[in-house]
Amino acid sequence: MRGLASHPGARGLDDDCAVIELGGETLIVTHDAMAEGVHFLPSQDPADVAWKLVASNLSDLAAKGAEPLGVLLGYQLAEDNARFVAGLGEVLAHYHVPLLGGDTISASGNQVLGLTALGRATHRPVPSRGGARVGDGLWLTGPVGAALLGFEAFKGGTGDSLAYRRPEALLRQGQALAPLVTAMMDVSDGLLLDCRRMAEASQVTIAVDRGAVPIATPEARRDEALVWGEDYQLLFTAPANTRFPLGVHPIGEVIQRDTEPVLLDGRAPAGSLGYEHR
Amino acid sequence: MRGLASHPGARGLDDDCAVIELGGETLIVTHDAMAEGVHFLPSQDPADVAWKLVASNLSDLAAKGAEPLGVLLGYQLAEDNARFVAGLGEVLAHYHVPLLGGDTISASGNQVLGLTALGRATHRPVPSRGGARVGDGLWLTGPVGAALLGFEAFKGGTGDSLAYRRPEALLRQGQALAPLVTAMMDVSDGLLLDCRRMAEASQVTIAVDRGAVPIATPEARRDEALVWGEDYQLLFTAPANTRFPLGVHPIGEVIQRDTEPVLLDGRAPAGSLGYEHR
């Protein structure tokens, strides 16, 4: 939605989710679209595509500490719809999330899919990207780079990777962390890029300790792991002495706004920070 | 979503909207997708496409008597995005509805758009298609066939038609009617087809008085007007002696379930009843 963020009706588009107060509850809503050839490959199992479509949206809810209420699907029919429906059933059952509705269309060309996920906040204020404060620590729930290895294994036909095919949305972790964090988001487009987004939204600089970041790749590929997306770990800030009810990895700190929004071992990172959407 | 309605996680897919109880309020959510070449023509002004995308979803909310809370857009970038954004701004301003978020993607091929609209019910129980009762009257808020004439004028280059380019979602009317109706839906795919859907959902037969239906076409094209979609009038049932706070048109009655779900002047309608989605 960045391309439409200047629209006068637009609000809250600096974040992945809309937050709506309704009847004493706080509703969280997110919508992601995925296109064949861009976000998934024609050779992928449609069941895995369905899984990732749902899991990536639920991951946005996880970063808000939200409990899912359901999803709506915009589905463009393909040649084989049975595998998609099977994968949809699996992912919805896995997360105990109902399919609330949506639309099915028939159109030519590359398949385009859309998913809207709705949830209710379990903690208020709802964590956003914009709450990181100078002096906070920076944490990550788990390693990055597993999806990178999985993608390569898939492309090369050299192995199977659930991390790539069927990523997990960390809903339970998000709900446990929400009361403790000052800012939180999921890492969908690359750790350093998402650090920059958090830094920009919070008007701070985020200093990442390169060696402290847990990675799933060999050490030689650390820099790649730090900019590869789709691992859906949660990235969050909190007061430095916070104790967490689950295993998390300290990877840096929040400092006063510098000329650079992100520092990696004290220097501006070289090269791309991650996957930049249009 | 009819193709996925057999999915075990599916619920509420017999209707255009999902209805969710949340914190003492009732949330109404709907999602529609539109594809270039199927739901709109490449030659159409993208501003009008944006209008129809929003208005058709708001019309689903209108049929629930809902007040819109906002929309989320799944937007596939095209060559010209400025006209779409302009039309989006116009339709959102017209209905005082905020853009809450969404996703923008870049992909090749025909443009596919998705819109999710959220609203809150202004009256409970929320009207559905399934509440029509034997003995109820049947009403329509206004004429059908205006979009048919507009479509032909557009294709033939012979005139302009707001009814076709910029249909109205009857939100005010839907809110006024919601406390009075037993069943309500918007006519998006053809009056007779939508009558059949209401009859099936309500387990009744709907008897339409052909001559009583208000039409925007010449009389000679009455039968076409009765099966053409996109007029977005509200179709509803209520006890026969109900007095309404706005002008509405009595067009038939609800009778005991017959072998036919819809009767037109006492007989099964000939030919297609409307636009059948996949």
Image (cartoon, coloured by chain):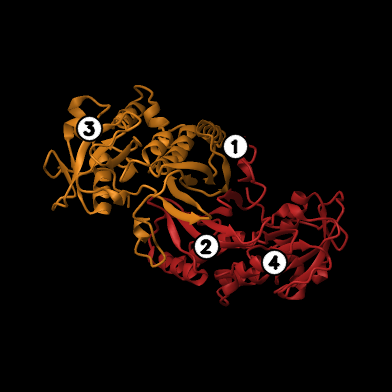
Chain colours: A red, B orange
* Amino acid at circle 1: Gly
Q: Eyeballing the image, is A272 above or below B71?
A: below
Q: Which residue is mark 2?
A: A54
The percent position of residue B5, horizontal first and vertical second, equals 35, 60
Q: Secondary structure at mark 3?
A: loop
The percent position of residue B155, horizontal first and vertical second, equals 34, 29
Same chain for labels 4 and 3? Say yes or no.
no
Is B107 on the left or on the right of A199, as rendered? left
Q: Quadrant of the N terminus of chain B?
A: bottom left
* Amino acid at circle 4: Leu
Same chain for labels 1 and 4? Say yes or no.
yes
In this view, the residue in front, B98 or A207, is: B98
Same chain for labels 2 and 4? Say yes or no.
yes
Residue lying at the far left of the rendered structure? B267
Label 1, label 2: how many angstroms apart (C-alpha)?
Answer: 27 Å
Q: Which residue is mark 3?
A: B213
- Contact, CB < 8 Å: mark 1 with mark 2? no
Label 3, label 1: how many angstroms apart (C-alpha)?
Answer: 38 Å
Same chain for labels 1 and 2? Say yes or no.
yes
* Amino acid at circle 3: Val
Label 2, label 4: how many angstroms apart (C-alpha)?
Answer: 22 Å
Q: Which mark is residue A177?
A: 4
Tag 4, which chain?
A
Label 1, label 4: how many angstroms apart (C-alpha)?
Answer: 32 Å
* Amino acid at circle 2: Val
Q: Which residue is mark 1?
A: A9
